[in-house]
Image (cartoon, helix red, strand yellow):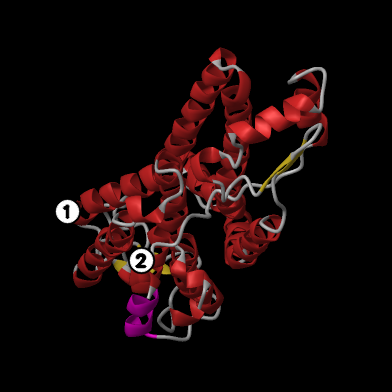
Amino acid sequence: PEKLKRMYHRIILAMNICVLPYAVVDFVGTWAMPIGTPYRIGAAGNQGTCIAQGFVSIIVTIAVPYYYSSLSVFSCFAVRNSFKEENYRHIEKWIHLGAIFVTLPIAIMFATRESINPGISVCYLAEYPNGCVDDPNVPCERGGDSLTSSIETIYGAAFAIITFIIPPAALLYLRGFIKRATRDTNRSVGKKKIIETFRKRVLKDLIAQSSLYLLSFWSTQIFLYISHGYHLITGKHSYDLVIAGVCCSSFQGVVLMLVYFQLEAKKGDVAVCEGPGFEIRNYQGAKDDTNLSVRDIREAAKRTRNRFSGWKSSLSSQRKYSFHIFDGEVDESSPWAK
């Protein structure tokens, strides 16, 4: 397909591949837990189904935010390389390999160490019986050893870094580009000032678009984060928060779809700047940031008494454009695009 020639669409496809089993795991819920699991309504499986559910859950729980985070990193590389995919195509293989190396070994290790057991709503990282780690009078039958607890801490730290540190850091990096663009605009004159003004406006749009995916993910996970924080502070589980969190997180595929198509719809717009004698169109596809030539500027100057003031006013009041951060020039030689 034509869209899969672009790295952005391939990353979105990989993310959706992870989101689908994420929703399936939540839908199965307690059905996968062994029959007779205390305080778990609907438990109808066995230890094998529980391990299978937990194995998938461990992978997708970190793989989904990993791909959201990779979109933020991808946008930084795109801006830095003027959206030419051949200059940053090498990061794609590391994005996909990273998703495997960060998740699969940990899931295998927890499965072999008998640390996948019934949790609150699904089988996940837990000791059995639940709470045996904190109660010296109740011996742990599965999991709960010190090594597994240490690795769980590392797993949690990796999740926090991928979800809460890398994406905001990428946005701050993009903001740095805006500040530099602002300084360049203040020092520029004539044609260069026009170009830098466009560039500054475009970069602001880039941050908004890059933030949209991140905020959409956080919005579907907010109740799960609150319930986890509640458990860390009080040592108890709020089942109302857990239920709300599971329901919201299961809809993240729908939210992702809405964001994706919203950004795709904006790509139909073009950059239009109407001046007193000429127009600039298709800003994104222009080489060296503009289609303007010296001849264009001279011809425009002949048709107006005020060489740039009227044009600048039109730039501020009449311009209409939409710039898509995840666009780029297709690298036909990339094996991922074939």
Q: Please indicate, yes or no, whether residue 175 appears anywhere in the rendered image.
A: yes
Q: How far, Cα to Cα, is label 1 from label 2?
A: 20 Å
Read off the magenta span: 46-54
Quadrant hosting residue 98? bottom left
Q: Mainly helix, strand or loop, the magenta region?
A: helix
Q: Secondary structure at mark 2?
A: helix
The residue that label 2 is drawn on is 59
- Please report the residue visible at 27 percent of the width from the left and 67 percent of the height from the top: 104
Quadrant hosting residue 272? top right
Q: Is residue 254 above or below residue 79?
A: below
Taking depth in this image into account, of 283 and 120 the one nearest to the observer is 283
Marked residue nearer the N-terminal end (1 or 2): 2
Task: Pick out the residue farthest to the left.
Answer: 147
- Say if mark 1 contacts mark 2, CB within 8 Å: no
Q: Please indicate, yes or no, whether residue 22 appears anywhere in the rendered image.
A: no
- Please report the residue visible at 42 percent of the width from the left and 86 percent of the height from the top: 45
Residue 261 x %, y %: 66, 63
The residue that label 1 is drawn on is 147
**Residue 97 as seen in the image, left or right of residue 308:** left
Asked if residue 156 lies in the magenta stretch, the reply is no
Q: Amino acid at mark 2?
A: Ile
